[in-house]
Image (cartoon, rainbow, N blue to C red):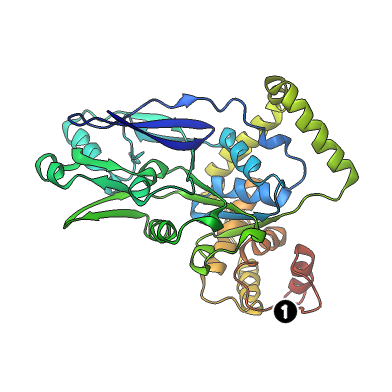
Amino acid sequence: MVEREYEFVGDEISYVEEVEKKAEIEEWKDIGKDVYPFAAIVNQETMKRALILNIINPEIGGVLIRGEKGSGKSVAVRGLEELLPEIEVFEGCMYNCDPRNPKTWCAECKEKNKEGSARIVKKKMKIVNLPLNITEDRLVGTIDVERILKEGMKAFEPGLLAYANRNVLYVDEVNLLPDNIVDLLLDAAAMGVVTVEREGVSVSYYSKFILIGSMNPEEGELRPQLIDRFALQAMVKGTMSLEERIEIVKRVDEYSRDKRAFREKFMDETEKIRERIETARRNLPKVRTPDKMMKIIAQIGIDFGVQGHRADIIMDRTARTNAAYEGREETNLDDVILAAELALPHRMRRMPLEEEEFSAEMLRKLVKRYI
């Protein structure tokens, strides 16, 4: 028996492969109790909001967090785990098939539904960590050609992207990923489908995930194709506020002394954020962008020389999601400014106001021209 471990932030899952038996997934083990609370992170509001908005609306398309070492990038992502909502899945399905979307069901779920034995359960979303040393087979899956011709899908060993379906896929130091892994990740992110081919045999499965990456620009840049796959980008810097730096040290010390007590201290605030996320997810379909705001979004894209229309679409989705999180059914200028602040830095070709650095303040000054 061969055991392979797949890394999960806050949780751990082991993949057990036996020669003559079907691969099975162990139950999720609750080892995420020591994660530093998301609500306890001092400042970094833009980064935290970018993460929250993607959880509310996965259609936004993920977020890249850029910042220096020790600025709380990975801490924030790991802390996000306790805010993730539940999703409906078929019991025992390793692909997390959506019961409401039959077109995406795996072969086993299709068979169980045909037999009437499929059972729908609720399962908390997970943050799946993609290690830098992952191989292609571990990422997409492995085909045993001889067995699959005899046994069908039972001989296919799913990869990490199968478990990432309908979850969050996190890549720390994403700029250091090998090119071959980047190519596979790009294909999956673009198509939402993973195809594995070996010796003329092909297996496909759905894999739609929220892609979150973090990186230190000092260690190298990302390929342009991968940068564009992150809908939003949040810049993170260590605070220069004396009070905030002192508070950070105090909180980290308090956390290291008694993790459980520290987490309980922020439990109410964590629950409030979780409830806001759930409410926003329910109300998001009601939120609309007025023509006036839509015109501003389009004009911003033109003034920054953004190619294509993806940025405009992302800004609209982000603005609507932020409005939902703030309890409104219509986007306003604040929503659009935030959306542009997150969607433009890695896409803009020029600066409309050359004497200004890119910032929310600069965007607000620019937008005054349109009103």
Nearest the viewer among 316 and 170 is: 170
Total marks placed: 1
Q: Is residue 70 left or right of residue 175?
A: right
Q: Is residue 317 above or below residue 128?
A: below
Q: Is residue 270 left or right of residue 204?
A: right
Disc 1 crowd rating (10 Å Cα; few below 14, some 14-19, many 20+) is some
Q: Is residue 10 left or right of residue 348?
A: left
Q: Is residue 9 above or below residue 360?
A: above
Q: Amino acid at mark 1?
A: Pro
Residue at the disc numbered 1: 352
User: What residue is rendered at 42% in x and 30% in y?
Assistant: 122
User: What residue is rendered at 9% in x and 41% in y?
Assistant: 150
Q: Could you tell me residue 280's position as x and y percent? A: 58, 43
Q: Outermost residue, left direction?
A: 150
Q: Could you tell me residue 306's position as x and y percent? A: 59, 75
User: What residue is rendered at 51% in x and 75% in y?
Assistant: 308
